[in-house]
Amino acid sequence: MPFAQRRVALLLLLVGLTGASFFLALGVGSLPLPVTTVWAALWHHDHPAFPVVWGLRGARAAAVWSAGALLALAGLLMQTLLRNPLADPYVLGVSSGAAVGALAAIVLGAAGLGVAAAAFAGAIVVMALVFALAHGAGPWSATRLILTGVIVASGASAVVALLLTLAPEQRLHSMLFWLMGDAASTTFSPWPMVMLIAVSLLLVTWGRDLNALAYGEATAQAVGVPVARLRWGLYVLASLLTATAVTLVGSVGFVGLIVPHAVRIMIGNDHRWLIPCCIFAGGTLLMVADTAARTLWAPLQLPVGIVTALLGVPFFLWLLVRART
């Protein structure tokens, strides 16, 4: 199949899989609903199953899909920025910063929006700290940014361990579930979707510059790309996307690693196609993982981060072996 047709086919396939996985998420659970019931409840607000389909499962599925799309897009930006297929939003410590904020809020007795706000604040603080340390007195390089992010993330992990040690026993359960990625308490908000659409439209207009940057700074500068400004913009956007995602579903790893790399293998490096394909693939992957997490061992609900880790660890090892060969 020609490359252009393959891109169109993949995007259409991912859109179809998003619809199918959303329909699956609405139908399965502790109360299985037939397809006809789900379909009727989707269109009639007075249907008896409407509260379950839209109020519970629909809201959760939409929030989880948004988080997966945000993580995949952030991973794509990180891999383009650092020119490293093993990079993902967690490399630069943004997730660790969010974890420190969220767990500190839980220790202090906060819940709901208080935890989400603290997670977002923690991610923003770490983002600013990493950027300031990596920048120093001169321009930062990808290697310097990665090393700074790893060091700051290690420090944040130590703070997380300290918070877990000092936390009251009755709050340890919620703290551990948040660290493993817990979508059970997720509520739908339109703002992550608004951010996703706005950032996506902005990035598509940067498609030519992103394609040039993927081939190296020298190539990008040769064709007139403002490299320093573009790299700064990518770093800020990727960090904000990650902070928003972890605020929604907690610390969920590997989505930002798996999805961009897999999509790039299938359709190449054109960011005008990578961006929408990563959004739909990331959202679908996390929505399917969450559906599996809440149904495979029902009535027990697993943290969705366990499912993504079971998928991500073998994929990461395959990447390492592939890089060696």
Image (cartoon, grey):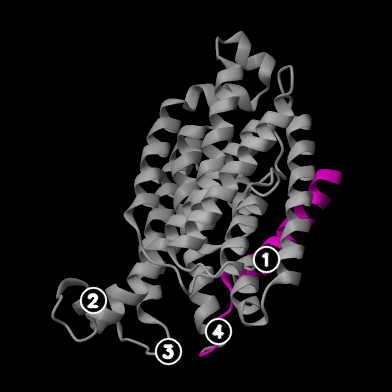
Mark 1 or mark 2, whichever is nearer to me = 1
Q: Which residue is mark 4?
A: 296
Estimate how packed mark 3 is, as few (under 14), some (14 to 19) or many (20 or more) residues with alpha carbons within 10 Å: few
Quadrant in the rendering for residue 149:
top right
Q: Which residues are magenta?
A: 299-325
Q: Principal SS element in the magenta part?
A: helix
Estimate how packed mark 4 is, as few (under 14), some (14 to 19) or many (20 or more) residues with alpha carbons within 10 Å: few
Q: Earlier in the sequence, mark 3 or mark 2?
A: 3
Q: Earlier in the sequence, mark 3 or mark 1?
A: 3
Q: Which residue is mark 3?
A: 30
Mark 3 or mark 2, whichever is nearer to me = 3
Q: Secondary structure at mark 4?
A: loop
Would residue 228 be visible to someone looking at this image?
A: yes
Residue 206: x and y in percent read: 46, 25
Are the residues tagged 3 and 1 within 8 Å (C-beta)? no
Q: Which residue is mark 1?
A: 309
Q: Which residue is mark 2?
A: 39
Q: Residue at x 56, y 19 (%)?
A: 229
